[in-house]
Amino acid sequence: MNVVGLITRDGEFLMVYNPVKDGWELPGGKVEEGETPEEALRRECMEEAGAEIGALTPLGRLDGETLVFQAPLIHMGRGEMRAALFAEPPEDTAYPREELEEIISLWRGCRV
């Protein structure tokens, strides 16, 4: 199982630059043995972006195997990857732009 997070602050969302895939992506990754999906996302956010995140809200599931969560960004330090906040998806994404837009629309659809 995989997790991905739409980590937000002030209407923007966090992305990390994956040099192997040569593009920006949302933080996330594989759930390791003995970990809950929520723990995995917190770990991945910290490793990739040095990001401490708040309470997680489930947004849905992609491709039958990836759980998508939203969480507020509390603090961002230094992680293993370059990280930045975006108001709109960048052009150079690491995976199909439609997938990223679907995740963002899930978040925008549930915001109050």
Image: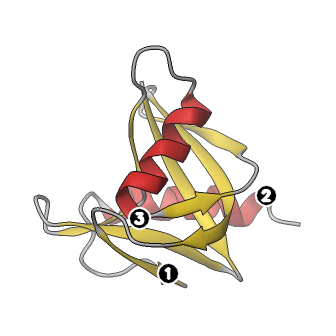
- Amino acid type at mark 2: Cys
For marks 2 and 3, the one nearer the N-term is 3
Q: Position of residue 99 (x, y in %)?
A: 40, 55
Q: Residues within 10 Å of mark 2 (few under 14, many from 20)?
A: few
- Amino acid type at mark 1: Leu
Q: CA distance from mark 2 to mark 1?
A: 20 Å
Tags 1 and 3 touching, CB below 8 Å: no
Tell me the SS state at disc 2. helix
Residue matched to label 2: 110
What residue appears at the point 42 percent right and 69 percent down from the top-left corner?
Answer: 15
Q: Residues within 10 Å of mark 3 (few under 14, many from 20)?
A: many
User: Outermost residue toward the front?
Assistant: 77
Which quarter of the figure has residue 22?
A: bottom left
Residue 88 in the image: above or below residue 1: below
User: Outermost residue toward the top?
Assistant: 34
Q: Position of residue 2 (x, y in %)?
A: 41, 32
Q: Residues within 10 Å of mark 1 (few under 14, many from 20)?
A: some
Numbered label attached to residue 85 = 1
For marks 1 and 3, the one nearer the N-term is 3
What residue appears at the point 74 percent right and 61 percent down from the top-left corner?
Answer: 109
- Amino acid type at mark 3: Ala
Q: Position of residue 27 (x, y in %)?
A: 42, 56
Colour approach in the figure: secondary structure
